Amino acid sequence: MSFAFLPLYTGDYLRDTTHLSPREHGVYLLMLVWCWQHAKPMPNDMLRLCRICACRDATDEAAVKVVLAEFFELEPDGYHNRRIERELTRSNGLVKRGKAGAEARWGKHNGHAKPMLNGCEIDAKSMDPNPNPNPITKIKSKALSGKPDALEVLGYLNRNCGRTYRAVDANLKLIQARLDSGVSVLQMKEVVFAKSKQWASDPKMAEYLRPATLFNATKFEQYLGELHGMPEVQG
């Protein structure tokens, strides 16, 4: 499986490569792109490597050898770059969780569709077309319609982390409390996105990608304060 976007963390990249020549930078980036697109190690074949890196002369070939020696490890199946392999593993995990979440969002549950709003499962009674709903149904419908921003944040969490948290008070009240304190929807999404990138590839930490942890009053302020320098929110 190949992925459309190669995650390039510029700070990490520059920290590790400031000593490279412009020619060596070009070779290294071409190798990273090839490994990402093919989801496998570089071939242990200098002729193929030179073609992949668009080598034109002996100087280009020397740059290939420099980059291989410093950033790749030779194994029986080819040259491995550990950073790319970690990102591939992480992306595969996100895709699998995303598919599971999509199936849940679209109601693949015992053959019956579940009503969804902003990526969140909601109580079917709150959507009852009965013109004379009972008082309990009125309360539920009013509660949902009064929290569109909270629903948007919960839906983003579900989509980005492959979750299926429902739009119930236990989840929405935490989000609404942060919104009422002056936090914006975008800031909440940025926290979800940042923590997903940090924790998704770690099975133990991935368990904390949940409303009770992310939107806890004390923890959320800590996470919000860590956003400086984090990648921009996606999706």
Image (spheres, rainbow, N blue to C red):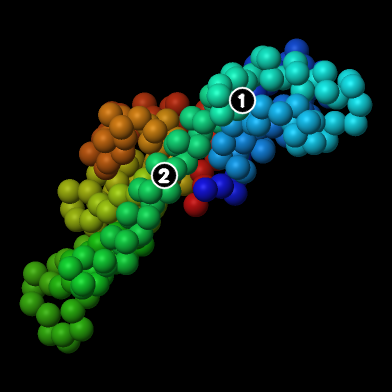
Sequence order check: which comes first, mark 2 or mark 1?
Answer: 1
The three-letter amino acid code for the residue at tag 2 is Leu
Disc sitting over residue 128 in the figure: none
Is 235 or 88 nearer to us in this picture?
Answer: 88
Q: Residues within 10 Å of mark 1 (few under 14, many from 20)?
A: many
Is 84 left or right of 203, judged from the image as shown?
right
Residue that protrudes farthest toward the right in the picture = 57
Image coordinates for residue 96, horizontal then vertical, percent:
38, 48
Is 26 left or right of 234, judged from the image as shown?
right
Residue under label 2, please give it: 94
Q: Up-down: is 118 above or below 185? A: below
Q: Which residue is drawn at 43% across and 27% down?
A: 225
In the rendered image, is residue 200 in sight? yes
Q: Which residue is drawn at 59% across and 49% down?
A: 4
Is 190 left or right of 101, judged from the image as shown?
right
Mark 2–mark 1 Cα distance, whole angstroms, equals 25 Å
Disc sitting over residue 79 in the figure: 1
The three-letter amino acid code for the residue at tag 1 is Tyr
